[in-house]
Image: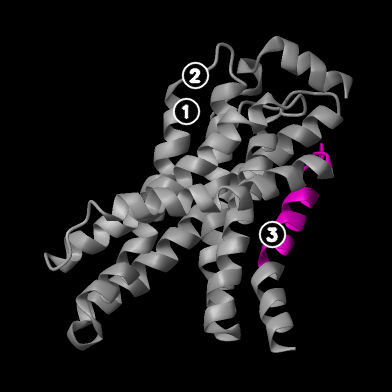
Amino acid sequence: MMVFLSLTAALLPSFWLIRYLIRSDAFQEPPRLILTSFALGIGIVLPVAFTAAKARLLLVLGGDPYAYALGRAFLTAAFPEEAFKFLVVAGICTRWFEFNDPMDGVVYGIATSLGFAAFENVLFVLYGGIGVAVIRALTAMPAHAAFGAIMGYGVARAFLASPPRLAPMLWAFLGPVLLHGIYDSPMLIIEAVGPANVGVGEIAMAAITVPSVVIGSLAWIYSRLSALRAVQLARLAGSLPPPRLLVPIVELAPARIERDALE
């Protein structure tokens, strides 16, 4: 019974976040593609783990604990995780015919990220129990969703522009890597320093940095979702909105606009 409760607590945040995302999309994506991107997020767990293990060999034990922790945060967590998510969103999801709206990048980015996070969450919760599930539901799961949304939005911004843009594609990858590394660093610094040597500075850093990254990323994504939703509703009403997005609707490829209009 306890295992069932732990699994439910581990998976429920992912399903709730995906449900909220689907309801936010006026032109809802096929469930099979959302599930596919979610499954692909699970599928990258093994290559991420292999890459992280190889990257960890580059880190030096017994040196500066801060440098070691930052190395772990960026080299063994942020970079491999976001790199493989990026390969899924930019390399696979953009090839789908249904990827024809900026909101689609956000949807598939979050679904891919939450697939990985759900599997990771199951492992953490089975080991740490319900308490870990509650903590991760308020921190790690929203963070993963936000990083995936930022990535997906950047990919859509690059892919749907005419001609396609390189700068937003780089931002779609480097932005989540940077945020993810900053998010992981404080707790890994505390772990590297050791419980006996942790001071007020390390605790304050964690207490400020982690919520700031999560809340700031979610606030930015919420503003983008609101803007994208406004564009979609304007399309449904038969009019084009003012260019509120970083990628104005008039910059999208004409063929894609025409295809959207036919939906």
Q: Position of residue 187 (x, y in %)?
A: 34, 71
Q: Position of residue 243 (x, y in %)?
A: 61, 26
Q: Earlier in the sequence, mark 3 or mark 1?
A: 3
Q: Type of residue at label 3? A: Leu
Quadrant position of the C terminus in the picture? top right
Res 170 seen here: yes
Relative to 212, does residue 104 appear above or below in the rendering? above
- Cα distance in 3D space between marks 3 and 1: 25 Å
* Image-based side of 236 in relation to 166, left or right: right
Residue 165 has which mark? 2
Q: Secondary structure at mark 2?
A: loop
Q: Secondary structure at mark 3?
A: helix
Relative to 54, does residue 16 appear above or below in the rendering? below
Residue hosting label 1 = 168
Q: Position of residue 241 (x, y in %)?
A: 71, 27
> Magenta residues: mostly which secondary structure?
helix
Q: Nearer the viewer, residue 238 or 67?
A: 67
Residue hosting label 3 = 17
Residue 211 in the magenta stretch? The answer is no
Query: How many other residues sit within 10 Å of disc 3, few (<14), some (14-19) or many (≥20)?
Result: some
Relative to 52, does residue 13 appear above or below in the rendering? below
Q: Nearer the viewer, residue 50 or 172?
A: 50
* Image-based side of 134 in relation to 204, left or right: right
